[in-house]
Structures are given as C-alpha cells and as structure tokens.
Amino acid sequence: MARINSSYEYSVYVGVRLARAGVKRVVIEVPESLRAPPGELEKRLRIELALRLYEKGIATLGQARRITGLPKWGFLELLAREGIPIHYGEEELREDLQVIRRFMEI
C-alpha cells in the first residue's frame, strides 16, 4: 500500500514476513521523483528487498519468494536473471519433500 505523506515524501508500506510469528511492517519514504504507477513502486521495492535479503543469507528462498509474491519457479528464474546463486537449505528441502509427498498421495 502506498500513500502520499503530508510532506513532499512518498511513503511505501512493505509487509515482510521473515519469522513464523508474524509480519514486520517497513515504511520507506522516497522522493516524489521516484513515483511510479500505483503499486509499481511497492512491487519493485519488494522484489529488490527480497533479492538482497536472500543474496545476503538473511532470508531463505521461501521467505524471499513470499516477499515478492512470485511462485517458486518465478522467483528461481528471477534469481537466475539477476545472477544470484541459489542457496538450498533445510527449509527448501522440507518444502520440496512436502510437495513430493502430496504428489505421491494422488
């Protein structure tokens, strides 16, 4: 959600879920010169935030993917386009095993 602040700044609210306990709300104020169509700036900031958190090892693949709102394969393609190596950890293994188990039940 984006809104115009009372000053010249343009505020963008980005909800980020990094812990299972909840969502952290981040407010980013950017100059009006960076304004984009409604929702576009928030989308771009979410993607950049997710990429950097993942790249630095702060967020897992699943957490970063959820920040962007992209499906898993879409986020993997984004990582490839950006030249960011994939870190495959325990959470990703658990997620993949859950998917495999669901397919085996069908």
Image (tube, rainbow, N blue to C red):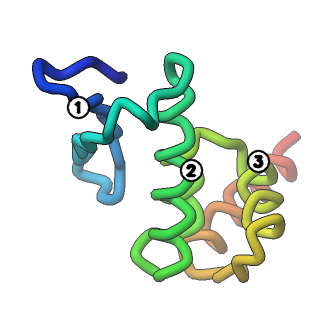
Query: First in sequence: mark 1 or mark 2?
Result: 1
Q: Secondary structure at mark 3?
A: helix
Q: Secondary structure at mark 2?
A: helix
- Picture quadrant of residue 1: top left
Q: Secondary structure at mark 1?
A: strand
Residue at image position (59%, 53%) is 65
Marks 1 and 3 sit apart, C-alpha to C-alpha, by: 48 Å
Residue at image position (42%, 34%) is 33
75 in relation to 7, above or below:
below
Query: First in sequence: mark 1 or mark 3?
Result: 1
Question: Picture coordinates of residue 27 (x, y %)?
Answer: 22, 41
Residue type beneath disc 1: Glu
Q: How would you rate the neighbour count of disc 3 (Cα within 10 Å): few for under 14, some for 14-19, many for 20 or more?
A: few
Residue at image position (27%, 44%) is 28
Q: Which mark is residue 68?
A: none
Question: Picture coordinates of residue 105 (x, y %)?
Answer: 82, 45
Marks 1 and 2: which is nearer the front?
1
Marks 2 and 3 sit apart, C-alpha to C-alpha, by: 29 Å
4 in relation to 74, above or below:
above
Residue type beneath disc 2: Ile
Query: First in sequence: mark 2 or mark 3?
Result: 2
Residue at image position (45%, 69%) is 53
Residue type beneath disc 3: Arg
Quadrant containing the C terminus is: top right
Using residue 85 as the reference point, say whether residue 28 is left or right of it.
left
103 in relation to 36, above or below:
below
Q: Which residue is mark 1?
A: 9
Question: Picture coordinates of residue 103 (x, y %)?
Answer: 85, 48
Q: Residue furthest left?
A: 6
Q: Which residue is mark 3?
A: 102
Q: Which residue is mark 2?
A: 47
